[in-house]
Amino acid sequence: MNLKNITADKLVALYKNKDLSVGEVISSTYEEIVHTEKDIHAFISLSPERALEEARRIDAKIAAGEPLEPLAGVPVAIKDNMAIRDMPTTCGSRILENYVPPYTATAVERLRNAGAIVIGKTNMDEFAMGSSTENSGFFVTRNPVNPERVPGGSSGGSAASVAAGTSLIALGSDTGGSIRTPASFCGVVGIKPTYGRVSRYGLVAFASSLDQIGPLSKTLRESA
């Protein structure tokens, strides 16, 4: 299934009607990542085992007729400067290549509590210092609209993932344009929330008085 052609609310409706299974969608998302990553390089790390386990749990809830959370089974990507327990958090830097946090960022926890499934961590300019995602310690991310061009930064991997159809919603962080610039470059919606609106707990700081976690998606409704 191509995530480019659907929105989060419509996907959840298909799950509720049993027209699709969450396992099918998550599996096909990883298949799409295999095809796109060789050109785009949006992800630093992936978590297929955990994602498929969560998919099976949600499919069991659907089969049992239990109510679903608003983002149940929605594939999401997380910028790699946000802590997720038992997953690497590199900030796009070789310095933190082997760092695995013992806790999870509040914004990520809230997405999960809403039923979203984290598929992986996205590439970024090292420690969020850049505007093109060319300054990652690992590799350059390309713009899915035109791989000859940059996706903007520093949340370029998150924007590229949404634009490529390998996640429906992604989290980025914005200090001086790091969500808004890649959203513009990749033709997606990006919001820097009002300071304090979203918890920064678990976000590796660039400038704490300016940093904000915010969403990237195809539509305003999904970002809301």
Image: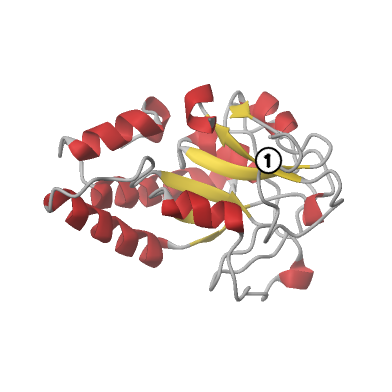
On the picture, is 94 further left or further right than 188?
right
| Percent coordinates x, y for residue 50 in the rendering | 39, 65
| Percent coordinates x, y for residue 207 in the rendering | 87, 51
Q: Identify the image quadrant of residue 89.
A: bottom right
Asked whether 117 or 152 is in front, the reply is 117
Q: Residue at x 19, y 50 (%)?
A: 66
Q: Residue at x 23, y 34 (%)?
A: 14
Please, which residue is most extreme toward the front here? 196
On the picture, is 55 further left or further right than 113?
left
On the picture, is 129 further left or further right than 110?
right
Asked whether 159 or 68 is in front, the reply is 68
Callout 1: few (<14), some (14-19), or many (20+) C-alpha neighbours within 10 Å? few
Q: Hey, what amino acid is under mark 1?
A: Arg
Q: The residue tagged with tag 1: helix, strand or loop?
A: loop
Q: Residue at x 46, y 42 (%)?
A: 166
Q: How many marks?
A: 1
Visible residue check, residue 219? no
**Quarter of the image where the N terminus is located:** top left
Q: Residue at x 13, y 48 (%)?
A: 65
Q: Identify the image quadrant of residue 58.
A: bottom left
| Percent coordinates x, y for residue 90 in the rendering | 69, 65
Q: Is residue 110 above or below residue 212?
A: below
Q: Is residue 173 above or below residue 50?
A: above
Q: Is residue 41 above or below residue 205?
A: above
Visible residue check, residue 160? yes
| Percent coordinates x, y for residue 7 in the rendering | 39, 29
Dot 1 corresponds to which residue? 197
Please, which residue is most extreme toward the left here? 64
